[in-house]
Amino acid sequence: MIEINNLCFYWEKSYVIEGLRLNIQAGQHLFIEGPSGSGKSTLLNLFAGVLCPKKGDINILGQNLRELSPSQKDSFRADHIGFIFQQFNLIPYLSVIDNIILPCSFSAIRKQKALQRSGNLNIEAIRLLKALGLNDQALFQRSVNELSVGQQQRVAAARAMLGSPEIIIADEPTSALDSGHRDAFINTLFNECEKENITLIFVSHDTSLKKHFSNHINLTDINQIKQEK
């Protein structure tokens, strides 16, 4: 599913990731831990093609991201990757439902999958919201600015899940949830991924979440970065 070979990335010649090698299998649920500043978010943006490696290769679904133009990377990401951002990145002037179905405006593939699941994009969005514990239908047509932080986080997760992308990348997705909602959120995320054999890459500095995952790595163990360059 994902093959990383000798990956290197730096800002202004200051290395963040160096010599990283990693293979992730289809359907795997992988927890990546590491302290703040260890390069976790940078790595996720490399996975998604938002950043381009200085050295090395990232192969996803058999496609080397280096071979794609910026517009091709955008299309590839829209079709195959759902991203749960740490800062949510919801569109404030859109309703809850419209935020969730937004990926279908950029990906015919995900739109078709969502329609196959529920026959209607709004119905599929509501199904995901309810699975994530948002059952108040009065919220569905409101602006996302009217929601609590925890509610916004679950909207962001539903948006990433819509249309069953092959890969979901989650960057600190439970930071705004209490322990009860956090565990329920992870269980729902696992269930949705297992139904569609989605590969889940979950990054957090909260090591208490590691117990939910059969596969986990510490970024500092596989990153060959040296202290001085």
Image (spheres, rainbow, N blue to C red):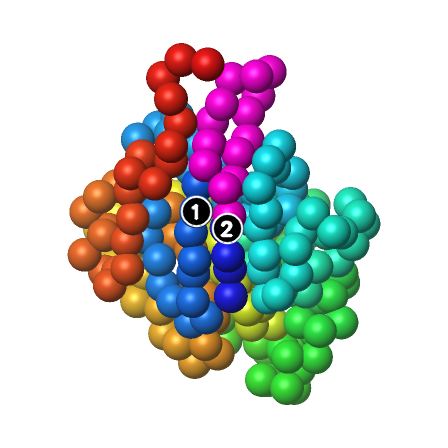
Q: Position of residue 91 (x, y in %)?
A: 66, 46
Please report the residue visible at 64 percent of the width from the left and 79 percent of the height from the top. Answer: 113
| Left or right: where 74 falls relative to 159 | right
Disc 1 packing (10 Å; few <14; some 14–19; many ≥20):
some
Asked which secondary structure carries label 1, the reply is strand
The percent coordinates of residue 74 (x first, y second) are: 73, 52
Q: Are marks 2 and 1 in contact (CB under 8 Å)?
A: yes
| Residue span colored magenta | 5-19
Q: Is residue 124 above or below residue 6?
A: below
Badge 2 amino acid:
Ile
- Give the Cα separation between the discs numbered 2 and 1: 5 Å
Residue drawn at x 49%, y 23% as measured from the top left: 15
Residue at the spot of label 1: 21
The amino acid pointed to by label 1 is: Arg
In the rendered view, tell whether residue 12 sits above or below residue 19. Answer: above
Direction from residue 28 to residue 108 in the image, left or right: right
- Which sits in the foreground, 116 or 93? 116
Between discs 2 and 1, the one toward the N terminus:
2
How far from the left and from the top, in percent, is residue 101? 66, 64
Return the residue at label 2: 4
As for residue 117 lying within the magenta part, the answer is no
Residue at 24%, 51% in the rendered image: 209
* Whether residue 116 is visible: yes
Q: Is residue 147 above or below residue 54?
A: below
Label 2 CA crowd tier, 10 Å (few <14, some 14–19, many 20+)? some
> Is residue 98 visible in the rendered structure shown here?
no
> Which residue is at the front of the view, 201 or 57?
57
Decide which of 173, 121 is in the foreground and name it.
173
Q: Going by the image, does 116 lie left or right of 205?
A: right
Q: Residue at x 48, y 78 (%)?
A: 196
| SS at mark 2 in the image | strand
**Dominant secondary structure, magenta:** strand
